[in-house]
Image: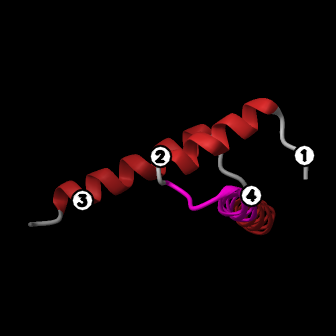
């Protein structure tokens, strides 16, 4: 593994501050962050694909339709006693 001088300084500072025990722990934490970011990206893409499939199945709404639906929800909430 090769780190740039800036990465080495950053990792050394993190260890010196007591955030990590050693360089290996810094690298493991970085790998864990990359894994989490990839999982979140995959989940986001899956939700976009699901939304697209739903839109194709149920039809797409334009801005006016969305505005009308939200206005109706707001009116219904205003009529509902608390």
In percent of width and height, residue 30 lies at 70, 56
State the residue position of label 2.
17
Q: Quadrant of residue 10?
A: top right
Q: Are marks 1 and 4 in contact (CB under 8 Å)?
A: no
- Whether residue 22 sits left or right of residue 1 in the image: it is left
Q: Nearer the viewer, mark 3 or mark 4?
A: 4
Q: Residues within 10 Å of mark 4 (few under 14, many from 20)?
A: few
Residue 35 included in the magenta stretch of the image? yes
Most foreground residue, 25 or 71: 25
Name the element at disc 4: helix
Name the element at disc 3: helix
Q: Nearer the viewer, mark 1 or mark 4?
A: 1
- Count every numbered label the image shows and give the total: 4
Name the element at disc 1: loop
The residue furthest left is: 82
The numbered mark at residue 34 is: 4
Q: Residue at x 19, y 54 (%)?
A: 78
Q: Is residue 48 visible?
A: no
In percent of width and height, residue 44 lies at 70, 60
State the residue position of label 3.
77
Q: Could you tell me how far apart the alpha carbons at marks 3 and 2 are, in whole angstroms?
A: 52 Å
Magenta: main secondary structure equals: helix
Residue 29 included in the magenta stretch of the image? yes
In percent of width and height, residue 82 lies at 9, 66
Q: In the rendered structure, which disc, 3 or 1, sits on the residue that comes first in sequence?
A: 1
Q: Which residues are magenta?
A: 19-37
Q: Are marks 3 and 2 in contact (CB under 8 Å)?
A: no
Q: Residue at x 17, y 65 (%)?
A: 80
Most foreground residue, 50 or 12: 12
Q: In the rendered structure, which disc, 3 or 4, sits on the residue that comes first in sequence?
A: 4
The numbered mark at residue 2 is: 1
């Amino acid at each position: 593994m090769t780190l740039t001088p800036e990465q080495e300084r950053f990792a050394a500072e993190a260890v010196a501050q007591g955030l990590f025990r050693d360089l290996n722990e810094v690298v493991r934490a970085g790998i864990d962050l990359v894994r989490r970011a990839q999982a979140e990206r995959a989940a986001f893409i899956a939700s976009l694909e699901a939304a697209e499939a739903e839109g194709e199945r149920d039809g797409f709404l334009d801005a006016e339709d969305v505005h009308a639906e939200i206005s109706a929800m707001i009116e219904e909430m205003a009529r509902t006693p608390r």
